[in-house]
Image (cartoon, helix red, strand yellow):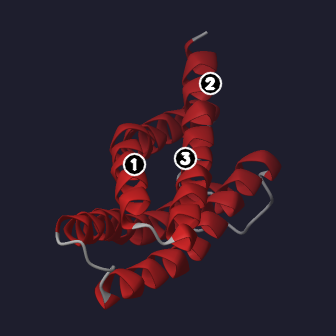
């Protein structure tokens, strides 16, 4: 029963990472395309909150549950698909951490534009494009992890 509960928590955590990431990307992109600093500030506030509440929780939960599941199932963390999943998880985090900072900075720039009744500054647009660009490898890595978890392909031992 414990194994089932931990596996369920792991699957839900993975779904939260994928779903929150996709939702955040969609809402930020739509707000950006509309170009209204008020909308961008509001959406960015919610996105930052969602990242801290949902994404960060899942980010903490995944390695704990994943390590326990691997150990309980007799896998080594160096086994091919497990090691590949861990490597991709690190890649995802390497792109996600700067994105969180970018979201907070874009939010602050939009708030400042509202307060000063001005247009969004060039820094906002630079950050947005970096944010947009960072999303592709992070999202692709999460999709690849899902595939690895489901398919468990025979990848040479990495120990």
Asked which secondary structure carries label 1, the reply is: helix
Res 78 seen here: no
User: How far, Cα to Cα, is label 1 from label 2?
Assistant: 21 Å
How many residues crowd mark 2 within 10 Å: few (<14), some (14–19), many (20+)?
Answer: few
- Residue at the spot x=59%, y=68% of the render? 158
Asked which secondary structure carries label 3, the reply is: helix
First of labels 3, 2 by sequence position:
2
Q: Is residue 77 above or below residue 132?
A: above
First of labels 1, 2 by sequence position:
2
Q: Which residue is mark 1?
A: 51
How many residues crowd mark 3 within 10 Å: few (<14), some (14–19), many (20+)?
Answer: some
Res 127 seen here: yes
Q: Residue 101, image x and y in percent? A: 28, 67
Instruction: Tell me the quarter of the picture where residue 148 sits.
Output: bottom right
Q: Which residue is mark 2?
A: 8
Report the front residue among 7 and 19: 19
Query: Quick check: marks 1 and 2 in contact, CB under 8 Å?
Result: no
User: How far, Cα to Cα, is label 3 from label 2?
Assistant: 18 Å
- Residue at the spot x=51%, y=62% of the render? 28
Query: Quick check: marks 3 and 2 in contact, CB under 8 Å?
Result: no
- Residue at the spot x=43%, y=53% of the render? 43
Q: Is residue 71 above or below residue 94?
A: above
Query: Quick check: marks 1 and 3 in contact, CB under 8 Å?
Result: yes
Q: Residue 76, image x and y in percent? A: 56, 49
Q: Which residue is mark 3?
A: 20
Instruction: Tell me the quarter of the picture where residue 69 sits.
Output: top right
Q: Residue 138, image x and y in percent? A: 55, 68
Q: Which image quadrant: the C terminus? A: bottom right
User: How far, Cα to Cα, is label 1 from label 3?
Assistant: 8 Å
Nearer the observer: mark 3 or 2; the answer is 3
């Amino acid at each position: 029963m414990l194994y089932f509960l931990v596996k369920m928590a792991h699957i839900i955590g993975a779904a939260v990472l994928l779903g929150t990431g996709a939702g955040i990307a969609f809402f930020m992109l739509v707000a950006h395309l509309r170009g209204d600093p008020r909308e961008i500030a509001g959406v960015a506030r919610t996105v930052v909150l969602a990242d801290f509440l949902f994404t960060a929780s899942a980010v903490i939960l995944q390695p704990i549950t994943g390590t326990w599941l691997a150990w309980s199932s007799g896998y080594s963390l160096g086994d091919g698909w497990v090691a590949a999943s861990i490597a991709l998880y690190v890649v995802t985090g390497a792109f996600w951490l700067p994105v969180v900072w970018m979201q907070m900075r874009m939010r602050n720039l939009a708030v400042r534009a509202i307060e000063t009744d001005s247009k969004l500054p060039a820094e906002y647009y630079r950050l947005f494009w970096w944010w947009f660009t960072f999303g592709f490898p992070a999202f692709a890595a999460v999709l690849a992890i899902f595939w690895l978890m489901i398919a468990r392909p025979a990848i040479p031992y990495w120990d």
